[in-house]
Image (cartoon, rainbow, N blue to C red):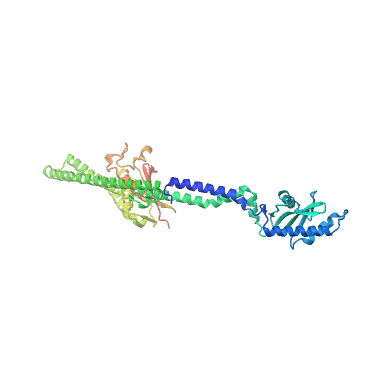
Amino acid sequence: MINSLTARIFAIFWFTLALVLMVVLMLPKLDSRQLTPLLDNEQRQGLMIEQHVEAELAGDPANDLMWWRRLYRAIDKWAPPGQRLLLVTSEGRVIGVQRNEMQIVRNFIGQSDNSDRPKKKKYGRIEMVGPFAVRDGEDNYQLYLMRPASSPQSDFINLMFDRPLLLLIVTMLISSPLLLWLSWSLAKPARKLKNAADDVARGNLKQHPELEAGPQEFLATGASFNQMVSALERMVTAQQRLISDISHELRTPLTRLQLATALMRRRHGEGKELQRIETEAQRLDGMINDLLVLSRSQHNNELAREPLKANELWADVIDNAQFEAEQMGKTLEVTSPPGPWKLIGNPAALDSALENIVRNALRYSHHHIALNFAADSEGITILVDDDGPGVSEADREQIFRPFYRTDEARDRESGGTGLGLAIVDTAVQQHRGWAKAEDSPLGGLRLIIWLPLQQR
């Protein structure tokens, strides 16, 4: 087996080309209608018939007025059963031929006219044999034998040999399986590499030993790919460890800060400065929590998934959001609740996605939030509208980035860590969906989530 892909392509290309050339050049020679020498028994039979015809003509006196009659009598008498004899005079007249056979006979006479080397040739279901020399006094005739072909070629084979282009097409069709095998063998390692790359894109950082097999070029590529996956896995592990360590280290002074704030409040009473310190400490604590959630979700795309129903999955999230809206003096309207639509996913991640997008609307709306669920044959669409200040068109694609802040009213004064929508986008993409933002009919921002339904 050739291990080099370059050598394999080169060898199969030239082998296929040689096969096509060989078929094109050699197949016409296999045409049974080719002019071929007689077998020994055919040669003996022809000579015997020749002698009988000569003897018959010698015993039948010539008649100048109807000279051809004696020729007919001779060839009719000594023609083998089921066969016919033809005589060609020195002037080129053919005795014993029928009108519809004249073209065939003339063609054969033009190709075989040497009585020392008689030939045979098939014309469809007829075979011509000859010539044999017949002497009739001072006249010389050429004797031909017309008989049924022993194994006539089919009309399709005859058509193929008579049409070189058709022969070439048939040859290419015959060589197609070899070329298909070549294409398949070349594409197989490429498909493996593509599937492995898809796994990496989904966050599944595992090595693929099957890539390190096959042609040398793909073997080297597979080894490099596995090395890359190992390096990525080490980098991701190191990044997660770094974030975890940083978060742990940040929590220690943060806890001390919160403790010190509580002691100062006890000693000196409530104050604006203490309240401000406590608010920022709580915000920092929430940011650390969200950062850890985002980091884990971004590097853990292979979530545990299970069959879910939309109405059961998000029922608690909707109830909690409506309760929070009442506490904030706002209205959350569910214009179309979720139905019992089936999907496959991680309940915690999908809960978190909807919760973050609804909390975002609650945080920035003035008075009203609208929540709408719809489904078709492909997936579920969730619309969350608010009547807040909205987001400019230039910022709509950026708000799903971690820590991104707009220059408008949705800023730090409204609270939040800037990680909520990044968590939403990550969770939705893990479930092969998408999230986007656009203008809301309520005057603020509309956030849209689309998730695929479970395919039966």
Q: Position of residue 406 (x, y in %)?
A: 32, 38
Residue at image position (27%, 40%) is 412
What residue occupies the far top of the structure in this picture?
Answer: 407
- From this viewpoint, which residue is outermost toward the right? 65
State the count of labels: 0
Q: In the picture, residue 67 is in which quadrant? A: bottom right
In this rendered view, identify the residue nearer to me: 177 or 48. 48
Q: Note whether 46 is above or below 241 in the view shown.
A: below
Task: Return the residue found at the far bottom.
Answer: 81
Horizontally, residue 276 falls left or right of residue 300, namely left
Q: From the top left corner, tell me how far across and down residue 450 is, in percent.
A: 39, 49
Q: Is residue 295 visible?
A: yes
Nearer to me, 143 or 121: 143
Residue 360 appears in the picture as rendered: no
* Residue sitting at x 72%, y 60%: 45
**49 relative to 231 in the view: left or right:** right
The quarter of the picture where the C terminus appears is bottom left
Q: Which residue occupies the foreground of this view, 377 or 301?
A: 301
The residue that appears at 44% across and 49% down in the rendered structure is 187
Give residue 91's position: percent from left, percent from top.
Answer: 80, 48
- Above or below, 213 relative to 81: above
Residue lying farthest left? 267
Relative to 9, is 44 above or below? Answer: below
